[in-house]
Image: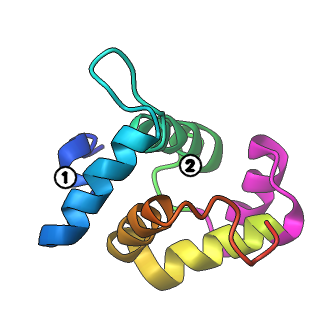
Amino acid sequence: MSEPMPVDAMFHLPGKAQETMNQSRWIAGCNPAGCHPDCCGVGIQNRMEEYRREVLNGDASVPDDEEIARRLKENCEWTDNSAQELHRLAKYYGAFMLRNALALAMVLDIEDGDGGF
């Protein structure tokens, strides 16, 4: 298993965008005494641990698409439609694009988006 990604490596934004992200972290309540769980990667690390445990479930190989959706639904409390969409997004866009999408969504204060999830 690979080492968890350092928090600072999770958000690669150029110049002004990084400054805006840092301001967003401050607005979200990030400070040395405590941090909003999503903006500094703590929430992401916790979610990754949950998915390793509940979706991979100790399997040596990655389960097929149907099994991943089933495990997300049964073990992680996603609806069937949401589990399928979450998996589709992960497969289609990958971690690089989704990390940056998360950073942008947080900067723009987009919590739930237009997808209805």
Relative image position of residue 9 (x, y in whole percent) = 19, 52
Q: Name the residue at the left extreme.
A: 15
Q: Give the residues in magenta.
A: 63-81
Q: Is residue 8 visible?
A: yes
Characterize the magenta stretch by its predominant secondary structure.
Answer: helix
Q: What element carries label 1?
A: helix
Q: Name the residue at the top extreme.
A: 33
Alpha carbon separation for disc pair 1 and 2: 24 Å
Pointer 2 residue: 56
Q: Is residue 40 visible?
A: no
53 or 23, which lies in front?
Answer: 23
Tell me the number on the disc at residue 9: 1
Q: Given this view, does label 1 or label 2 mark the residue nearer the observer?
A: 1
94 or 7, which lies in front?
Answer: 7
Q: Indicate the amino acid at tag 1.
A: Ala
Mark 1: few/some/many CA within 10 Å (<14, 14-19, 20+) = few
Relative image position of residue 28 (x, y in whole percent) = 47, 40
Residue that appears at 12% across and 70% down = 15
Residue that appears at 42% across and 42% down = 27
Q: Is 92 left or right of 69, judged from the image as shown?
A: left
Give the quarter of the figure containing the N terminus.
top left
Q: Can residue 77 be found in the magenta stretch?
A: yes
Q: Indicate the amino acid at tag 2.
A: Leu
Residue that appears at 32% across and 72% down = 96
